[in-house]
Amino acid sequence: MTGASALIPVIAIGGMLAGAGALTAQETKVPSDSELVSLAGCSKGRVFTVFEAPEHEPRQTTVAVGRHFRLNGHKDVLNNIHLHEGQLIEVTGLVKKSDLKGPGGIGIAGGRVRIGGPQPRSAVGNPGMDASYNNVGTIDVSAWRQLGAGCPSE
């Protein structure tokens, strides 16, 4: 082999290794206490409410319809979501596993009263705040997409 033809396999192997490194760099690491989810629903301000996904879309069964999440993420992503307020969207992001479980105990009186759940607590610095606010989880949004024209009524 000549010097130029011997370099071709080395360059090809180097290109394959560089491509494999780029693929692993694009994958996001999910912490052990969190889960990557895609949820269909509607946003109003920074609050996202889970709704049923359209029939042609895959469904996430672990999160109850009507559940609320506070949206966190890059300013550009949150601004784009805000522009589509009132439209059915799907957000993808990380949620702590403890936020996916929801409140404990057995709900009676339309879920307003919980028997056997954790003690309600007020927000730090604002004892007058409604304790139901503590049942709102947080989702760190990494991506979103529009699913439908309008939001269903709650």
Image (cartoon, rainbow, N blue to C red):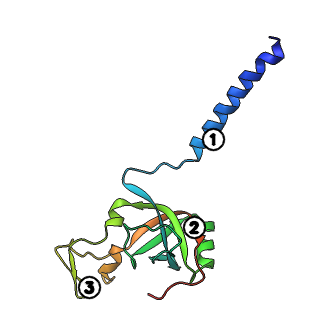
Check disc 3 and report its element: helix, strand or loop.
loop
Q: Which residue is mark 2?
A: 144
Q: Hey, what amino acid is under mark 2?
A: Trp
Q: Hey, what amino acid is under mark 1?
A: Ala
Q: Earlier in the sequence, mark 2 or mark 1?
A: 1
Rendering coords of residue 106 (x, y %) = 20, 76
Residue in the image at 55% along x and 78% along y: 88
Q: Earlier in the sequence, mark 3 or mark 1?
A: 1
Q: Decide: few, some or many residues near mark 1? Use Cα within 10 Å; few <14, some 14-19, many ≥20.
A: few
7 left or right of 149 in image: right
Rendering coords of residue 40 (x, y %) = 49, 72
Q: Which residue is mark 3?
A: 112
Q: Decide: few, some or many residues near mark 2? Use Cα within 10 Å; few <14, some 14-19, many ≥20.
A: some
Q: Hey, what amino acid is under mark 3?
A: Arg
- The dot on residue 58 is none
Q: Determine the image quadrant of residue 85.
A: bottom right
Name of the residue lying farthest toward the front: 56
Kindly report the distance in space between the C-alpha atoms of the residues bearing marks 3 and 2.
31 Å
Rendering coords of residue 145 (x, y %) = 59, 69
Answer whether labels 3 and 1 touch (C-beta < 8 Å).
no
Q: Determine the image quadrant of residue 64.
A: bottom left
Check disc 1 and report its element: helix, strand or loop.
helix
Rendering coords of residue 23 (x, y %) = 60, 42
Q: Which residue is mark 1?
A: 22
**Which quadrant: the C terminus?**
bottom left
- Between disc 3 and disc 2, the foreground one is 2
Q: Is residue 2 above or below residue 50?
A: above
- Is residue 125 visible from the viewing direction of this image? no
Q: Decide: few, some or many residues near mark 3? Use Cα within 10 Å; few <14, some 14-19, many ≥20.
A: few
**Which quadrant: the N terminus?**
top right
